[in-house]
Image (cartoon, coloured by chain):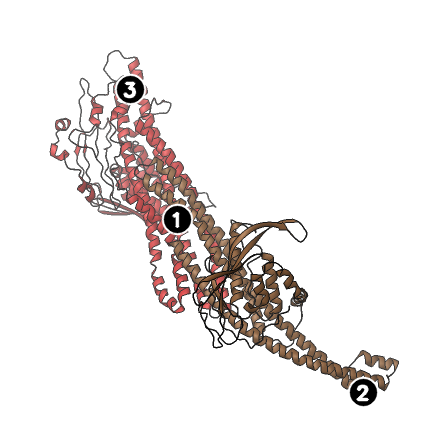
Amino acid sequence: MEQAPPGPERPLQPAPMEPLGRPTARLEAVVGEEAEGSRGEGRGDGTVTENNFSLKKIEISVSEAEKRTGRNAMNMQETYTAYLIETRSVEHVDGQSVLTDSLWRRYSEFELLRNYLLVYYPHIVVPPLPEKRAEFVWHKLSADNMDPDFVERRRIGLENFLLRVASHPILCRDKIFYLFLTQEGNWKETVSETGFQLKADSRLKALNATFRVKNPDKRFTELKHYSDELQSVISHLLRVRARVADRLYGVYKVHGNYGRVFSEWSAIEKEMGDGLQSAGHHMDVYASSIDDILEDEEHYADQLKEYLFYAEALRAVCRKHELMQYDLEMAAQDLASKKQQCEELATGTVRTFSLKGMTTKLFGQETPEQRDARIKVLEEQISEGEQQLKSKNLEGREFVKNAWADIERFKEQKNHDLKEALISYAVMQISMCK
Amino acid sequence: HLLQSAGLSAERLLQEDSEEDCEDGGAWVMHFTSVIHWPPCPFHGVFMFSLHDLILPNGGTPAGTSSPASSSSLLNRLQLDDDMDGETRDLFVTVDDPKKHVCTMETYITYRITTKSTRVEFDLPEYSVRRRYQDFDWLRNKLEESQPTHLIPPLPEKFVVKGVVDRFSEEFVETRRKALDKFLKRIADHPVLSFNEHFNVFLTAKDLTAYKKQGMALLTRVGESVKHVTGGYKLRSRPLEFAAIGEYLDTFALKLGTIDRIAQRIIKEEIEYLVELREYGPVYSTWSALEGELAEPLEGVSACIGNCSTALEELTDDMTEDFLPVLREYTLYSDCMKSVLKKRDQVQAEYEAKLDSVVLRKEDRPKVPVDVEKCQDRMECFNADLKADVERWQDNKRQDFRQLLMGMADRNIQYYEKPDLKQRLPRIEKQGPPARCALVFCVVLQPLRVLVLCAEVVLSWRAEPPRCPLGSHAHTPLTKTVVSPSVPVGPAVSCRQRPPGLQPE
């Protein structure tokens, strides 16, 4: 079941995105059964469009995480975490939510979904998943995938991923995505039936290939450059932030030592005793407050990480464009050379060095029939090539148009989200001070 | 009855020590010495009585006590000192203006000592002299010699490991200057030490070297006698209060040491944190260069983190310059006190030994040889002086520590109210919420944390109204002081008890 990328005749306004909020944040995504015309803006505002069809609002949440054991592909015992995905549909009229679906998925299935989306929507900046392994950790933070804090943060990340996909005007209509939310068993088989694996492999290969484009699109080059820089700056930021957190933890904890000394000192004092005792107590409180503070900061780090991975997705889109461009150029080049060959054969002049020319010289000229046959073949190829070139050009232009639309959308989203992230970081610091 | 026999009027004695007086900071001290006749043999005794007052908020001197009388230079005078609080203090000493002197033989630093006084002991109302550390050291030794029964404040460390610490660095000189200033102020505030002639000369003489040379002749006889107390006398039992002080000092010094270590560790951690912060801020700047709409907020965050770093650096500097030296001074002070306590023990031990030997070969009681009496005098004098000094030390300690933390809190408040923050806010306003919030949080970040902490500590102390430092020490009737069970202690003890007219705090 192959899903073609939706055509450009479906301009949908994206539902505004709520920033990564508190753990139990729920986002209402407006999902349309059919997309035609524009829909109302604003969260929770599922309106009836001009074309008069009803829209269903869907709430998605990843509400629980559970440790499980099972057998993996190599029939070995393994422990993994499964996440419960609950989907609720909200009838617009009365606003009550009804649980429509609930199933368990593990991280690898999320990965599969994302890879699928990457293959079939190459012009879309596909939302990233939370990190596979804990990176940018500072010493107290565990790098263990089974660690409850890590699992909790991952749960939030996965929920965020689903919400972003659901609120994307194009991605939300994908059938496989829909099945991911609704069809527990057999989903993996359904995906592989699309034959996407082959495409995935070739995509990966292509992305990693090195080639040079003769006429690169400046915008995409700049964007690729930007995404590289963004990735590098955010990783640097996260690394330093981890070190800062580590040091801050040290400062707070050493203050805790004061607690004991002050309390011991207060025992030998008379008038100063009570004051010292309470000072010691406050030191203890201060020292233990760092744990909560840094946990909140991890949340901020996660928001940054999301955009770190987003930068990667952005880069992939640029690369895809490069690929297409290269492909186009190659095709054009090929066509040009064929045309030239044809011309040479027809006119009998050899302008460029070719193997045929050499062999002709060496082994004698070919018969006119042979030559005509070859010309005919070439002419067929040329017309085929021209067709291909035309469609490739069209494809290329389509791609650029769609990609650029999505990129604009992404930029808006990014600016909005990061501003919110910075604000909440600031607010967090202020409340910590208090 | 006793007082009347000494010729004092009752009204004077019954001057109130009421609550209001305390709040006003009125303190009064009464000295009197008298000759008590203990029939049938003459016995010179000295006793004194002191009444302390509340500690004054402006750091005024707690009232002092004893006069440096000894049995050999008995002073039959009646003295009624006016209150010695900050309002009527008559001796002000300051140490400032360090200057480097380079000579062929050596390089050293001198400090300017400025003295202002209305006392008769000073010819001029104002003096300004220059002294170097050596001179301070000399002064301290002289004071120890001439006032052996008193606690002399400590000097900052004499020896500095060359190569590790730069003797001429600004920080070192400033730390030392502060310590020397404190040293002189403590002496100036001491009711007995401030009248010492060596101190006077130190503050006034143009040429100290000449005076130093003739110093030997000025040793007091008390000094001599104390010097002659050699070791080897075993103390039978230390009076409870001094034992308690000794134990207290041991624990106190231990705790101070621990706090010092912790403070140093904190400073070290904070410096490492600072290093990371310094790298953290600029990354936001780099990022902001990539962005369009986000550029301003990101730049704002970067600037804030920079401010945080600066604030933190100032905080650690203050910790190093103000907090640690006070801790160290009190450790030195404890050491001084302990050595004085030891000397006191020695005096007591000598007295006991002499007394024993007398009792052993005694036939005609109750003739007590003069030298035994002398020992007893010495001991009791010592005890009294020391007790008074301990009181003063405790008060000063409370004072100093409170001042220390309040100073810290104040400094942090100043950071919070930084004027340039107010200038910056309108600019940030234009940039929008994220930058503004970011800026506010960063400037406030460090100082507020410490501020809140210090304020808590200070408030908890303030809730505890400083009570009369007399506490339980001086109230201890001397019957607890066991001299020797076989010798009737008699009136000497009862003299130390409070005259019936006055009420306890």
Amino acid on which disc 1 is placed: Met
Q: CA distance from mark 1 to mark 3?
A: 50 Å
Residue contact between numbered discs 2 and 1, judged by CB atoms under 8 Å: no
Q: In the rendering, what colour is chain A?
A: brown
Q: Is residue B118 above or below residue A362?
A: above
**In percent of the image, x 59 and y 67: which residue is there?**
A175
Q: CA distance from mark 2 to mark 1?
A: 94 Å
Q: Is B89 placed left or right of A44 in the picture? A: left
Amino acid on which disc 2 is placed: Gly
The subunit letter for the residue under badge 3 reads B
What is the crowding at mark 3: few (fewer than 14 residues within 10 Å), some, or many (at least 20)? some
Q: Is residue B388 visible?
A: yes
Amino acid on which disc 3 is placed: Ser
**Mark 2 falls on what kind of element?**
loop
Q: Which residue is mark 1?
A: B319
**Mark 3 falls on what kind of element?**
loop
Mark nearer the viewer, 2 or 3: 2
Mark 1 and mark 3, same subunit? yes
Task: Say which quarter of the image contains residue B364.
Answer: top left
Q: Which lettered chain is shown in red?
A: B
What is the crowding at mark 2: few (fewer than 14 residues within 10 Å), some, or many (at least 20)? few
Mark nearer the viewer, 2 or 1: 2
Q: Is residue B233 above or below residue A29?
A: above
The one nearer the camera, A264 or B98, is A264
Q: Which residue is mark 3?
A: B484
Q: Is A419 placed left or right of B210 in the picture? A: right
Task: Say which quarter of the image contains residue B202.
Answer: top left
Q: Position of residue B390 (x, y in %)?
A: 30, 34
